[in-house]
Image (spheres, rainbow, N blue to C red):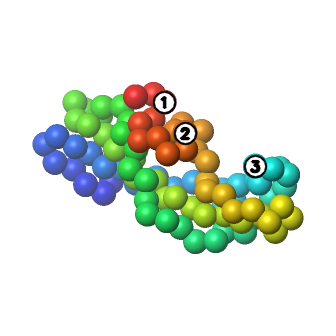
Amino acid sequence: MLFINAQEVHLEAEPVAYKQPCPLCGSEQGVKRNGQNQPRKIRHLNLFGKRCYLVLPSLRLACSRCHIGFVWTYSFVGPKERYSRLF
């Protein structure tokens, strides 16, 4: 938990895996972590009557086989979206 006040709760989350497969070739062997951008702040379901935000790392990854860079994809929120699919 990062922050809590009368109206909001901010929860920090991290991916369980260290790497994610490449979206083009599907391989995880050629993928390496390449840093991270600003954390994403995603609006989620209310928690105890307060607005709840998930703070997620925006991890940059690169595939040496395909020579592409990509950002970690979360299943519960689309790219460049600010609201979770449950919200």
Could one spot residue 67 in this view of the protein?
yes
Q: Which mark is residue 85?
A: 1
| 18 on left or right of 66 | left
Label 2 element class: loop
Image vertical order of residue 68 relative to residue 44, above or below = below
Residue placed at 52% from the left, 58% from the top? 58
Specify the quadrant that holds the C terminus. top left
Q: Residue at x 31, y 49 (%)?
A: 10
Residue placed most toward the observer, 85 or 49? 85
Write the residue at 36% across / 31% down.
45
N-terminal of the two: label 2 or label 1?
A: 2
Q: Position of residue 54 (x, y in %)?
A: 39, 47
Residue type highlighted by circle 2: Gly
Q: Residue furthest bottom?
A: 35
**Residue 73 or 48: which is nearer the viewer?**
73
Report x, y in % for residue 32.
72, 69
Q: Would you call the spot at circle 3 few (<14 residues within 10 Å), some (14-19), or many (20 or more)?
A: some
Looking at the image, residue 69 sits to the left or right of residue 13; the answer is right
Residue 23's tag is 3
10 Å neighbourhood of mark 2: few (<14), some, or many (≥20)?
A: few
Query: Quadrant of the image for the N terminus?
Result: bottom left
**Any part of residue 29 in sight:** no
- Mark number, residue 78: 2
